[in-house]
Image (cartoon, rainbow, N blue to C red):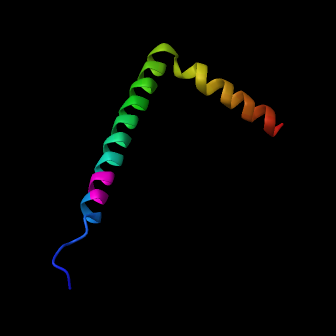
Amino acid sequence: MRSHRPNTPTSYRVLLSAIYLSSKFLFKLSWLSLNALGRNLSTDHIVIPILMKGHRLHH
């Protein structure tokens, strides 16, 4: 058996941390954009057209 360990686990850990950080950043970005949308538009402007569409589809 070789005593030298392959460096795949460390690279895997680096990859995981990079994915985690990028996903965290993306989540923060989407959350901020959602907040901005919520501030600019009232919920009625979003919810009511969807309800009207669903109502029209059902009937």
Residue stretch rendered in magenta on the structure:
11-16
In terms of secondary structure, what is the magenta stretch mainly?
helix
Q: In this rendering, is residue 44 above or below 13?
A: above
Residue 13 is inside the magenta segment: yes
56 relative position to 24: left or right: right
Q: Position of residue 22 (x, y in %)?
A: 36, 40
**Residue furthest out toward the left:** 3
Quarter of the figure with residue 45: top right
Q: Quadrant of the N terminus?
A: bottom left
**Could you say which quadrant of the image residue 3 lies in?**
bottom left
Q: Nearer the viewer, residue 24 or 7?
A: 7
> Left of 35 or right of it: where is 54?
right
Tell me what residue is drawn at x 74 percent, y 30 percent. Answer: 53
Q: Is residue 42 left or right of residue 1?
A: right
Q: Residue at x 53, y 22 (%)?
A: 43
Determine the residue located farthest toward the bottom in the rendered image.
1
When the figure is inspected, residue 40 is found, relative to residue 54, above or below; the finding is: above
Q: In the rendered image of this protein, does residue 37 appear above or below residue 57?
A: above
- Residue found farthest to the top: 40
Q: Is residue 42 magenta?
A: no
Residue drawn where x is 80% and y is 32% of the image: 56
Q: Quadrant of residue 12?
A: bottom left
Furthest-right residue in this view: 59
Task: Give the mark count.
Answer: 0
Instruction: Report x, y in % for residue 42.
Output: 52, 17
- In percent of width and height, residue 2 lies at 19, 81
Above or below for 6 versus 19? below
Assign the C terminus to one quadrant of the image. top right
Residue 36 location (% of width, % of height): 43, 19
For the residue pair 54 and 6, the one nearer the viewer reads as: 6
Q: Would residue 9 be found to the left or right of residue 22 on screen?
A: left
* Residue in view at x 80 percent, y 39 percent: 58
